[in-house]
Image (spheres, helix red, strand yellow):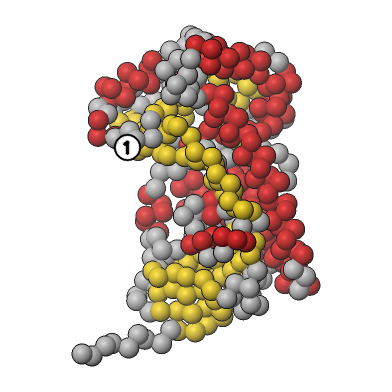
Amino acid sequence: MTTTPSPEPHRSTTTVGIVGAGPAGLMLSHLLARDGVDNVVVDNRSYAEIEQTVRAGILEAGSVRLLVDSGVSDRVLREGDEHAGIEIGFDGRLARIDFADLVGSSVWLYPQTDVFIDLAAARSRDGGDVRFGVTDTSVDDLTSDRPVLRFTDADGVPHELRCDLLVGTDGSRSICRRAIPETQRQQSFREYPFAWFGILCEAPASAPELVYSHSDRGFALISQRTETLQRMYFQCRPDTDVENWSDDRIWAELQSRVNVNGLELREGPITSRTVLRFRSSVCEPMRYGRLLLAGDAAHTVPPTGAKGLNLALADVGVLAPAIRAFLATGTERELDDYSVRALQRVWKAQHFSSWMTSMLHLPPDASVFDLRRQQAEIRSIIDSRAGSTYLAEGYTGWPA
Ligand code: DHB
């Protein structure tokens, strides 16, 4: 029997190896390159695969500033939609949370796909090294001062890339996180007894801003994409099969959940339907030796607070200067400080997302008591300037 010897890997070096070319990885790559820090980004997905995944749509003002001020692109300001508030639907009526009035801030409707397109274009414009469609990715020697990133590129060539630092921005199923021994990390989880049924539909917008609707049939969220394409979600069981849901059944469910005065839900053909399962998770610390984690690789939040993408961008906004300081001084404290600082925001966002979720979603076994208590909780937020301000601060994002 003959065996084919595995080809010798192509050996090279860089300062920072980044696993994952989603918004966190590409933004970090951009910020480091701007400071003259050499880096390579790899992702096992193709460009098209990432671009075509439908993701969330809300950017905090701080995320918009990061994109614009760091020179990625100002397309968000031209093509995004600034929202100075949201509507909360409950008990047959709508109440507006006015971000501009309450906290002098706003958010932007600008889908994650567009953030990815802008970042990938900026990396390409600036000569960044981003490899899509790699396979067999692994990380090793994490506690040495020359950790290694191994992968096979899209042409089948194996690579061994020695780095000063590795960063895992490779999403919730992160191989980087799993490379950290379990004894060296604290994993916190919370599962939820529901999921979101998400649709895209060809219809005009039903409302100028997002509508978060509580109802005795469960939660629904009316969001937008363009003048002719809309994004909507409704709470469903995690085991829901989209095949059992016709357009008519979906519209009947959505209509029953946003049955409030002052809102007419505009229907149209449904072009995409998916069930999004969600849970809260945090990995602490966000550092192990020369490996750092950022974004979903380190933490996931339920989508109700629109925090996932914003947290990922906030992480790398803290990580890039920490890496700079570490490279300038060789002081590992800078890397620990990153984890400590990032986790403060992460846990605030965990709390905010879990609070919004529990306030607006009906648990499967909810009693009349539970329903009335939730309605009272919503009323105590919207009837109170202090309560509304608390929601507005969390939704628009805390200062860095
Ligand atoms: C969207 C998603 C969210 O999770 C959210 O809270 C608001 C909007 C969206 O996809 O538009």
View extreme (bottom): residue = 2
Tell me the quarter of the picture where residue 331 sits.
Answer: bottom right
- Examine the rendered structure and indicate whether residue 162 appears above or below residue 169: below
- Examine the rendered structure and indicate whether residue 179 appears above or below residue 385: below
Residue under the image location 38 percent in, 21 percent down: 254
Residue 76 visible at all: no
Q: Secondary structure at mark 1?
A: strand
Residue 37 visible at all: yes
Residue under the image location 71 percent in, 46 percent down: 344
- Residue 384 relative to residue 194: left or right: right
Question: x%, y% of residue 386?
Answer: 74, 21
Question: x%, y% of residue 327?
Answer: 72, 72
View extreme (front): residue = 183
Write down the residue under mark 1: 272
For badge 1, the amino acid type reads Ser
- Residue 276 relative to residue 12: left or right: left
Q: Nearer the viewer, residue 35 or 190?
A: 190
